[in-house]
Amino acid sequence: MTFINYAAREINCKIVYYGPGLGGKTTNIQYIYEKTGNNTKGKLISLATETDRTLFFDFLPIEFGSIRGFRTRFHLYTVPGQVFYDASRKLILKGVDGVVFIADSQEVRMDANVESIRNLSDNLKEHGYDLMKVPYVLQLNKRDLPTAVPVPQLVGALRIKNEPVYEAVASRGLGVFDTLKAIVKSVLLDLRSR
Ligand SMILES: Nc1nc2c(ncn2[C@@H]2O[C@H](COP(=O)(O)OP(=O)(O)OP(=O)(O)O)[C@@H](O)[C@H]2O)c(=O)[nH]1
Ligand SMILES: [Mg+2]
């Protein structure tokens, strides 16, 4: 549901960071916010509880220069990962152009990762989208932890359709921009093919 404003020569795209609770979605967005120049980013809006868990969403508008004279503006959202906030997650997926899945590499979070991908698929379906067709990137976060599952094993369990996969340590910013660039590229490619 990309919004193209021909009069203003602007392309607006919505990217949603999805994934299990405490996987590092907000950490990704915060890093992007901190490392992006003032003239290319808007305000970071976070609706969080006092423990920093996402209550409804985080939102960051960011500009990516222009393509054929059109300014490209991306609206980054995160969802709350905690299981009981499903209504919010569903709502935030409305009008989505691309999804980044932030997986938690820890062994104990494997079930939560798998369950969250299933939940993503279900919630997309309710908006009439097919996960297999939506621009999609997989980030394997928390690679710094000793309990991190080996990458090939994670890829085997979580990769759904040959999507780009990035290893990350979001708390140190590693892999954050590679992931963002990949989803932007994928969304723009998808746009051109329509
Ligand atoms: N060790 C380690 N910790 C990380 C990494 N990325 C994020 N964290 C930490 O994990 C915790 C949760 O990160 P958040 O970004 O709040 O997770 P979230 O996915 O937004 O969680 P919800 O909003 O509850 O869904 C925080 O304490 C982060 O500092 C990482 O790569 N390695
Ligand atoms: Mg969060």
Image: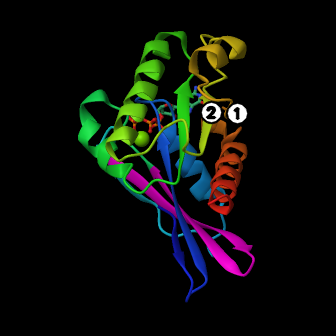
Q: Residues within 10 Å of mark 2 (few under 14, many from 20)?
A: many
Residue 23 visible in image? yes
The answer to which image quadrant residue 12 occupies is bottom right
* 25 over 154 or under it: above or below: below
Q: Disc number at residue 166?
A: 1
Locate residue 176, reporting x and y percent.
66, 43
Q: In the picture provided, is 82 more to the left or to the right than 179?
A: left
Label 2 CB sits under 8 Å from any ligand 1 atom: no
Instruction: Please say if the residues under marks 2 and 1 sit with CB atoms less than 8 Å apart.
Output: yes
Residue at the bottom extreme?
A: 7
Magenta-colored segment: predominant secondary structure: strand
Circle 1 Cα neighbour tier, 10 Å, few/some/many (<14 / 14–19 / ≥20): some
Q: Quadrant of ligand 2?
A: top left
The residue sitting at 50% across, 40% down in the picture is 25
Tag 1: residue type? Tyr
Note whether residue 40 is visible.
no
Q: Is residue 6 magenta?
A: no
- Residue marked by disc 2: 139
The three-letter amino acid code for the residue at tag 2 is Gln
| Left or right, 97 with reference to 126 | right
Secondary structure of residue under mark 1: strand
For image coordinates 41% across by 52% down, the residue present is 58
- Which stretch did the figure color magenta? 56-77
